[in-house]
Image (cartoon, grey):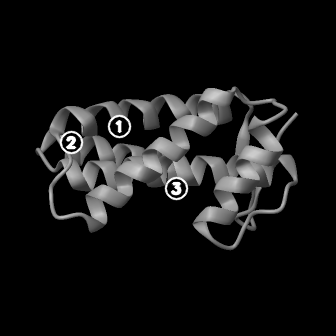
Amino acid sequence: MAKAIQAAASARVLLNTGDADGACNRAYYAMFDAARAALLASGAQVGRTHKGLLNAFSDRLVRNGPLPKEMGRLLKHAEAFRYVADYEGEPVELGDAQAMVEQAERSLLPCKKSSCQVNERNRFRRLG
């Protein structure tokens, strides 16, 4: 979860400097890393690719709970913005980047509330 928190903080810094593309990239990775942490905390397998992880997150944690369906939609939406930010010629609008950063910050809350933690071997687990 520490990696997700750091990516969200980096996204905010980049947004504050006017780097919309960089902010979208880091916002996506904040959400991606939070999804990975949640999967690991639940004991689920984590995909080896971005698509694999996104599908596992949707299948294991969103489709039938415990996370709201909106979390899955936001992650897919962030992936689309990251693609534009990283690979398209036109930059992401600053307002869109601000929305992405705010979504990334909100997406960290469910995992923080469920006490996802990193143990000494850098593997995530749910305490409780």
Whether residue 1 is visible to the viewer of this picture, yes or no, is no
Q: Which disc is residue 65 wearing? A: none
> In the rendered image, which residue does mark 3 sit on?
3
> In the rendered image, which residue does mark 2 sit on?
15
Image check: 82 left or right of 30?
Answer: left
Figure check: 3 above or below 108: below
Q: CA distance from mark 3 to mark 2?
A: 18 Å
Q: Residue furthest front?
A: 89
Density class for disc 2 (Cα within 10 Å; few <14, some 14-19, many ≥20) is many
Indicate the amino acid at tag 2.
Answer: Leu
Contact flag, marks 3 and 1 (Cβ < 8 Å)? no
Q: CA distance from mark 3 to mark 1?
A: 15 Å
The quadrant of the rendering that contains the C terminus is top right
Q: Which disc is residue 101 wearing? A: 1
Query: What residue do we see at 36% from left, 49% from top?
Result: 81
In the image, which is nearer the foreground, mark 3 or mark 1? 1
Per the image, label 3 sits on a secondary structure element best described as helix
Give the camera-side residue of 41 and 68: 68
Figure check: 15 above or below 122: above
Which of pointers 3 and 2 lies earlier in the amino acid sequence? 3
Indicate the amino acid at tag 3.
Answer: Lys
Contact flag, marks 2 and 1 (Cβ < 8 Å)? yes
Q: CA distance from mark 2 to mark 1?
A: 8 Å
Query: What residue do we see at 21% from left, 42% from top?
Result: 15
